[in-house]
Amino acid sequence: MITSLRLAAPACLLALSTAVPAAPPETASVAWSITEGLTTEVGQRIAGSEREAVARDWAVTRLKALGFQNVRIEPFTLRGFVRGEETARLTMPYPHALAITQLGHSVATPAGGIEAELVYFQTLDALKAAPAGSLKGKIAFINHAMKASQDGSGYGPFGDVRRAGPRIAAQKGALAAVIRSAGTDMHRNPHTGGTSFADTAPIPAGAVSLLDAELIARVASRGKPMRIALKLTGHPQDNLPSGNVLAELPGRDPSLAPILIACHLDSWDLGTGAIDDAAGCGIITAGALRAQQGGKRLRTIRVLWAGSEEIGVFGGAAYGEAHKGEPHALAMESDFGADRVWALRTSFAKSNPALHDRLVAALAPLGIVFKDEPVEGGADIGAIVAARKLPVIDLVQDGTRYFDLHHTPDDMLDMIDPVQLEQNVDAWSRVLAIVAEEKADLASGS
Amino acid sequence: MITSLRLAAPACLLALSTAVPAAPPETASVAWSITEGLTTEVGQRIAGSEREAVARDWAVTRLKALGFQNVRIEPFTLRGFVRGEETARLTMPYPHALAITQLGHSVATPAGGIEAELVYFQTLDALKAAPAGSLKGKIAFINHAMKASQDGSGYGPFGDVRRAGPRIAAQKGALAAVIRSAGTDMHRNPHTGGTSFADTAPIPAGAVSLLDAELIARVASRGKPMRIALKLTGHPQDNLPSGNVLAELPGRDPSLAPILIACHLDSWDLGTGAIDDAAGCGIITAGALRAQQGGKRLRTIRVLWAGSEEIGVFGGAAYGEAHKGEPHALAMESDFGADRVWALRTSFAKSNPALHDRLVAALAPLGIVFKDEPVEGGADIGAIVAARKLPVIDLVQDGTRYFDLHHTPDDMLDMIDPVQLEQNVDAWSRVLAIVAEEKADLASGS
């Protein structure tokens, strides 16, 4: 199953797109059209950039054309990250160019770069155990052993190598930190992402490809000194402009609280953000449209294409702040790629078992199982869910290959399997058709 | 089958190498040890470089330690290629960074790079059909539709996009040429390789990743003008030093012509040349040693680790020139990765059917089938085979994933499946044990 999923997208799209590059898949859907359009007409759209602004305008035009109402941009600013030059190479025991990318919120190396001893740590715990001051004048390398899984659960613990590793290295005096990318592929792709220094003075930090990390581990195992030359010129930048795009499919009863569904419009900049998260915007938007085929639903469905998720969930925070005074019925998000939905979580098992059972029954024909776990929601709905204690429904996607592609140069359209994308739309439309017809106060029992 | 092969190496090696980075696979063999050592202790070893010189010394030390005799370096010089800076980005219709690598034998862009209109050609034939002079002041982009196959047969016709595309573009006035990499993967990896301008004045030429080529095709299909900024500073260079490494397992009868078996020691420089061709050196060397377990064979087995194959088969040519006056019994080469041998071709079906039948019977237990086709030999044995009309045995490897990795940054150790590598050694040792015991003049009937 894993292997077939992994190859489904490239295999089917290769056949299709090399023969007739302009042709959409046979199931030319709204979800595909949005995903293809954003990644082909806009490209990368890193938080706070000119390209993200282009993406907002593109989104407004597209959502209006699809029949959405109240389409608008809600602007905000953020402290973002501007990428620069990024090169790294081992200089000892021999020259080897590393595939590297700088991590968001880290700082530039001195002009001309730095060259220093590379100290190998097999795990984040090994780094934590290093004596205070022991990395003075050195560069830390942090390895890890994240594995692919259907639920992507390795990203929690092993993602800490990226989220906390550079800060811990800085606290021990390191000049810079280089990590094994927080991913699961075996390619020469670095995975970017944000790191955090909290109150520690930031240092330059980058992530190398997993293949380079394997090489570094083998060289380290031979016990010879390693040195690395590192040049990273990216840097944080304040007051970058961004914004959320909102749009609505008005319901028959405007007095009822709306259903909020979210994705994020920004992407990291190494690829074109197909799985993260153009596909999510395609899925929720197509799902909403299909849910009201045959006529308006009782409740309004509000679509949030959030800005600047990647570098600190600024769009989600801005939405929560701006709309915390308004009633919402329910919130859902799609931000875990475009592979099939395999499980369902809801807030309604106890508060509204009849609704819960209808949801489970509606998804059962798709092979989607109920997962009796707390709901998770998503980054962009996090603030409004917390502010209003909203119920949530999670349509849980297969994450087996998600961290092969996440934040890498490979996150491009050809990684999307149109068949699985459509299964997502099917699942979303079934759920939205039910919850948008629910008259009962959904939030009351959550 | 294709999917399981594709994933076998990363899956098994991920589990193994992240847990204990220094550990060799359980079947720690000579073939693995050579492949791991060359890629970990020497790294990339492009033709004519200091790293290739290090690789020759490494090879001499290793072959002596393994018990080979007459271990020696036969030096030569070549016109090679020195890589420089290489960047490319679409500037219209919007900025998009392309994963690019410069092609060998092409020349540098003017200082500061160039920026020009990009003219899209769906195929090499479409480029050929362009009017004379129509590319003046422009940059050609050439797409193609190469597919993966067990026998790698797409590389012949579609590889011409790389081998001839830049020259044809130059003849029509192009400032530079950019091609879809001659490969089959869907990753953000460019595939390097040599091109040829013959008598045409060379232009800068690069290959972009297949994912970038797909994006360019989609953008082109929208009919908007495209422009590209290109900076390639690599250039050809004369009189680079290289050399072949030769070593022998002397036979019981020195008067009999030796069996020649070859691989190449140099690699392209984007990866560390694991499948191309450290594994080949591991396979033939381990196969030779295993073939004489229990005592010397009748004939000498001569191992050729050829230098500078990639940029023009200079090592093979030098060997042919230096040794064309010496009798050889037979030649074989391993230079198609490390996946399993699935077929056999021999020169002996008519000239020595008893020998032929013994070979077929010896390989049948491994599931290797006889392929009734002309033998192909290999680049490095090409000159000596032609000069002396030598018989050849081909142990044909599964090439399904070869052109996913060929000449890319991904050509690193973790792509090698140790189980399939060992199957190669098994096949080689069975063949060598037979032919090195053959007293009859092998070359006579070919």
Image (cartoon, coloured by chain):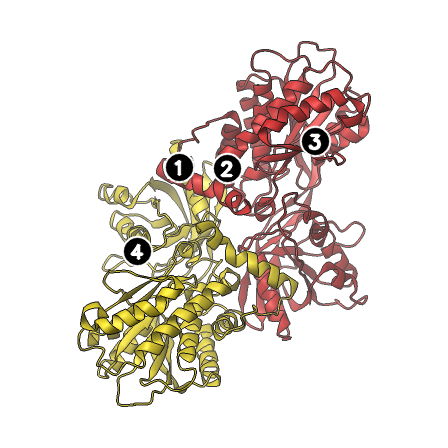
Chain colours: A yellow, B red
Q: Chain of mark 1?
A: B
Q: State the quadrant of the C terminus of chain A.
A: bottom left
Q: Nearer the viewer, residue A418 or A166?
A: A418
Marks 2/3: CA–CA distance: 34 Å
* Tag 3–tag 4 contact (CB < 8 Å): no
Please state which amino acid type lies under the numbered disc 1. Leu
Q: Chain of mark 4?
A: A
Marks 3/1: CA–CA distance: 40 Å
Secondary structure at badge 2 equals loop
> Residue visible at 48% across and 58% down?
A409
Secondary structure at badge 4 equals helix
Are tags 3 and 4 found on a single chain? no
Q: Chain of mark 2?
A: B
Q: Position of residue A429 (x, y in %)?
A: 39, 74
Secondary structure at badge 3 equals strand
- Marked residue nearer the N-terminal end (2 or 3): 3
Q: Position of residue B343 (x, y in %)?
A: 65, 34
Marks 4/1: CA–CA distance: 25 Å
> What number is the disc on residue B96?
none
> Residue visible at 57% across and 22% down?
B63
In this figure, which residue is indicated by the disc labeled 4?
Answer: A163
In this figure, which residue is indicated by the disc labeled 1?
Answer: B16
Q: Would residue A5 appear left or right of B307 to someone viewing this image?
A: left
Q: Position of residue A169 (x, y in %)?
A: 29, 49
Mark 3 surroundings within 10 Å by alpha-carbon count, few (fewer than 14), some (14 through 19), many (20 or more): some
In this figure, which residue is indicated by the disc labeled 3?
Answer: B76
> Residue visible at 37% across and 84% down?
A248
Are tags 2 and 3 found on a single chain? yes
> What number is the disc on residue B417?
2
